[in-house]
Image (cartoon, rainbow, N blue to C red):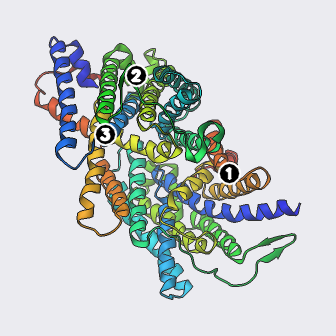
């Protein structure tokens, strides 16, 4: 029993990271109809930048804000210079453009930071916290707090703010949205900035847990995408739930069966959900495109 | 594909075929000359170029005909490679027999996958093929009793007839170039046939085609199987050339490479796979050749940047693909003559 609890705690932490990548896939796909495989690279760039800034002894809050802003700006810039220019091209071309961008970004990462993984100490020092029979590291608590804040903020953004409602309108009916004076172009750039900003912030929180390296982007993008698909690829909160489900499932499989099955599980789930339940595991109601 | 369709019906059809064969043979010689007289390419690059072109031609058929994206094409390349590799080593089968077995396994896998995913549309279909490719890669590493896991399988025999064995890169290039030529011939015949027209109709309109009595699902699964056979054959040739298979040659990046080759080359012409393979090989090798002159130390990062960056630029600028652009340029020169295929294909 205590083993189960511990495995779930581990899975929740990993799942939180998947959730933060997955949520970006959903926001961008909703507004623009594009699967953005660059998503994981923003996390890599911001995580690596954060390691450099930490070495320069910049205070953590400043690093966090600066790196998040950098990721959001980079996302908006790349959207303007690639996706917006190729608008109207077919799906294969758009997906390949994001994959090409992703390859180039990992190359830049390799060039700047080299092959060795980097990390910095947890946000707060101290022994792991006891949670009944299980223990959880302090950085994991930071990650969970971060995901909780982002989830609430996203919910408020999409349900209360004008910009959030405009993005939802774009997702529901681009033509009608346009007639109301919403610019799909600006919404597309905004969706990229929002998603990549979230990925960037997640990168800063992630580093003390897993360390960062130039090739961390693509695996994270694939897991985040799986999380988004589990959630139906339509609702940000669905993607977050999908991330936790995937993280916990992976943790249980590697704990109770064998860790070798973990990778296969994610891809089998991805294939199974796409083929059998393309609207996601969480039921049609939870996956309305918002 | 439209250009070939016209030629098959035109009075000058035979002349055009002779011309195409001559151009094809000339292109092969030109590549050999490039490898002989410049340092840009080595003979081994030519072999990999031809193998990639064979696999990508299959992808051009799938994507050009039915408008469906496959991000898991490397899985069929891998099925071909591992099938012949394992069967020739463990069962002592002759390479041609093992290749046919590999083709049969690939066809079965493609048929099952096709039936499962072709109910999906757009993104979901592309992503299901992606998941299939990722899962196949995982199986290669996990089922290590059969596949040798991450270390792979070695000792695969080379091809040969009697005492003539494919021991040099040049011989292997000849074999691969011949197979590619036959593959292109088959593809252009397919494009010009009534079947090809029905297939293009399914890509052009999902509503009009079934209304005209085309069984869309059967057509799509059929062309998906044919495309997978190309990849499988290329994979088998790879296994007998390298004499060693390991999972890394058959992962996501290989699927992406095939997709890049097909898309850059162009999906509207059977030549797309070949054109794309030449361009992408020249791009990658050119970067590897030029970069050390400008930068010190490791060039891995620059190679990724040049490859990824060039990919983005080509896709943003030449959306239809290079072979398509050339075909259109040639056609507009004889625009005065009405071309029946243009009207049939409103895209």
Q: Is residue A163 above or below residue B277?
A: below
Between the residue at mark 1 and the residue at mark 2, the CA separation in whole angstroms equals 40 Å
Left or right: where B324 falls relative to A265: left
Between the residue at mark 1 and the residue at mark 3, the CA separation in whole angstroms equals 35 Å
Q: Which chain is mark 1 on?
A: A
- At 51% across and 20% down in the image, what residue appears? B218
Question: Dot 3 corresponds to which residue?
Answer: B277
> Are labels 1 and 2 on one chain?
no
Between the residue at mark 3 and the residue at mark 2, the CA separation in whole angstroms equals 24 Å
Question: Dot 1 corresponds to which residue?
Answer: A262
User: Looking at the image, which is closer to me, A117 or A210?
Assistant: A117
Q: Is residue A40 above or below residue A283?
A: below
Image coordinates for residue B193, horizontal then vertical, percent: 33, 15
- At 23% across and 58% down in the image, what residue appears? B290
- At 59% across and 63% down in the image, what residue appears? A20
Can residue A179 be seen by looking at this rendering? no
User: Looking at the image, which is closer to me, B244 or B318?
Assistant: B244
Mark 3 or mark 2: name the one nearer the start of the chain. Answer: 2
Q: Which chain is mark 2 on?
A: B
- At 35% across and 45% down in the image, what residue appears? A89
> Are labels 3 and 2 on one chain?
yes
Question: Dot 2 corresponds to which residue?
Answer: B199
| Crowding near the residue tagged with mark 2, few <14, some 14–19, many ≥20 C-alpha atoms within 10 Å | many
């Amino acid at each position: 029993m205590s083993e189960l609890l511990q495995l779930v705690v581990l899975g929740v932490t990993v799942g939180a990271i998947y959730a933060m990548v997955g949520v970006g896939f959903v926001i961008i796909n909703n507004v623009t109809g594009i699967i953005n495989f660059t998503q994981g690279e923003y996390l890599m760039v911001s995580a690596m930048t954060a390691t450099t800034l930490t070495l320069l002894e910049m205070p953590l809050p400043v690093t966090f804000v600066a790196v998040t802003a950098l990721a959001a700006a980079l996302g908006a810039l790349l959207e303007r210079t690639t996706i917006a220019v190729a608008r109207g091209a077919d799906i294969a071309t758009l997906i390949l453009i994001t994959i090409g961008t992703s390859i180039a970004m990992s190359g830049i990462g390799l060039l700047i930071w080299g092959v060795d993984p980097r990390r910095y100490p947890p946000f707060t020092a101290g022994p792991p916290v006891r949670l009944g029979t299980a223990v959880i590291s302090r950085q994991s608590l930071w990650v969970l707090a971060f995901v909780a804040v982002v989830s609430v903020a996203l919910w408020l953004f999409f349900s209360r703010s004008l910009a959030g409602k405009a993005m939802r309108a774009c997702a529901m009916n681009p033509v009608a949205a346009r007639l109301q004076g919403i610019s799909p172009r600006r919404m597309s750039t905004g969706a990229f900035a929002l998603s990549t900003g979230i990925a960037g912030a997640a990168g800063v929180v992630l580093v003390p847990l897993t360390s960062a390296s130039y090739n961390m982007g693509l695996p994270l993008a694939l897991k985040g995408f799986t999380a988004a698909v589990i959630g139906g690829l339509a609702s940000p909160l669905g993607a977050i739930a999908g991330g936790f489900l995937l993280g916990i499932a992976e943790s249980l499989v590697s704990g109770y069966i064998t860790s070798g099955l973990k990778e296969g599980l994610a891809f089998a789930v991805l294939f199974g959900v796409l083929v059998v339940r393309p609207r996601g595991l969480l039921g049609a109601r939870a996956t309305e495109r918002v | 594909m439209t250009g070939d369709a016209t030629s098959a019906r035109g009075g000058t059809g035979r002349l055009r075929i002779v011309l195409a064969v001559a151009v094809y043979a000339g292109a092969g010689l030109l590549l050999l000359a490039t490898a002989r007289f410049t340092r840009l390419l080595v003979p081994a690059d030519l072999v990999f170029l031809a193998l990639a072109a064979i696999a990508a031609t299959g992808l051009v058929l799938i994507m050009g005909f039915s408008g469906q994206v496959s991000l898991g094409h490397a899985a069929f390349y891998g099925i071909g490679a591992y099938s012949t590799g394992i069967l020739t080593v463990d069962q002592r089968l002759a390479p041609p027999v093992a290749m046919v077995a590999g083709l049969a396994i690939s066809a079965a896998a493609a048929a099952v996958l096709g039936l499962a995913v072709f109910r999906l549309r757009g993104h979901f279909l592309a992503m299901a093929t992606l998941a299939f490719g990722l899962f196949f890669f995982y199986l290669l590493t996990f089922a290590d009793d059969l596949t040798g896991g991450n270390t792979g399988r070695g000792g695969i025999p080379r091809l040969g007839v009697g005492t003539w064995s494919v021991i040099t890169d040049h011989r292997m290039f000849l074999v691969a170039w011949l197979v590619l030529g036959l593959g292109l011939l088959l593809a252009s015949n397919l494009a010009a046939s009534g079947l090809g027209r029905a297939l293009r109709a399914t890509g052009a309109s999902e509503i009009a085609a079934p209304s005209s009595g085309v069984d869309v699902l059967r057509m799509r699964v059929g062309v998906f199987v044919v495309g997978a056979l190309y990849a499988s054959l290329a994979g088998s040739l790879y296994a007998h050339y390298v004499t060693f298979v390991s999972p890394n040659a058959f992962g996501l990046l290989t699927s992406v490479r095939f997709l890049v080759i097909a898309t850059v080359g162009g999906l509207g012409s059977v030549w797309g796979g070949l054109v794309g393979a030449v361009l992408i090989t020249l791009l990658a090798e050119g970067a590897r050749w030029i970069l050390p002159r400008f930068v010190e130390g490791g060039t891995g990062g620059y190679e990724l940047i040049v490859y990824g960056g060039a990919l983005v630029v080509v896709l943003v600028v030449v959306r239809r693909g290079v072979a398509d652009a050339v075909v259109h340029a040639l056609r507009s020169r004889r625009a005065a003559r009405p071309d029946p295929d243009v009207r049939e294909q409103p895209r």
